[in-house]
Image (spheres, rainbow, N blue to C red):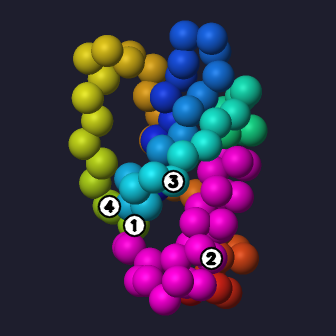
Amino acid sequence: TVVLTREPNGTYTVEVPALPGCLTFGETVAEALFMAEDAIQLFVESLTAKGKPIPPDQPHVDLDTTDTPEVLVYKVTLREAAKVA
């Protein structure tokens, strides 16, 4: 699960709640989702290389949209990361 937040300049910041510290961005929603796949894959590869467990996805994400009205939530499926995990 990834959370896209539209920034004032029109770009999208991407956070991965299950992987704290895994962040990226994109100029458009499509680019942000593409970048999210890459960021998640690299994050998972890094965890695996360090012998750390890969946290499970979070089925429920609590969002506070008080200050950020445009927030999108997507599920991203990783083909390559599945081989690593």
Name the residue rendered at 65%, 22% in the picture. 11
Q: Which residue is mark 3?
A: 22
User: Judging from the image, what secondary structure is the residue with disc 4 in?
Assistant: loop
Q: Which residue is mark 4?
A: 59
User: Judging from the image, what secondary structure is the residue with disc 3 in?
Assistant: loop
User: Judging from the image, what secondary structure is the residue with disc 1 in?
Assistant: loop
Q: Label 2 to label 3, Cα distance in Å?
A: 12 Å
Q: Which residue is mark 1?
A: 57
Q: Is residue 31 visible?
A: yes
Q: Which residue is mark 2?
A: 45
Q: Which residues make up the magenta segment?
A: 33-56
Q: Quadrant of residue 48?
A: bottom right
Specify the label residue 4 is tagged with: none
* Extreme-front residue of the structure: 50
- Residue 29 is left or right of residue 21, and the answer is right
- Residue 48 is left or right of residue 20, and the answer is right
Q: Earlier in the sequence, mark 2 or mark 4?
A: 2
Crowding at mark 1 (Cα within 10 Å: few <14, some 14-19, many 20+): some
Where is 56 relative to 75, above or below?
A: below
Horizontal and vertical percent position of residue 32: 67, 39
Q: Amino acid at mark 3?
A: Cys
Where is 72 relative to 85, above or below?
A: above
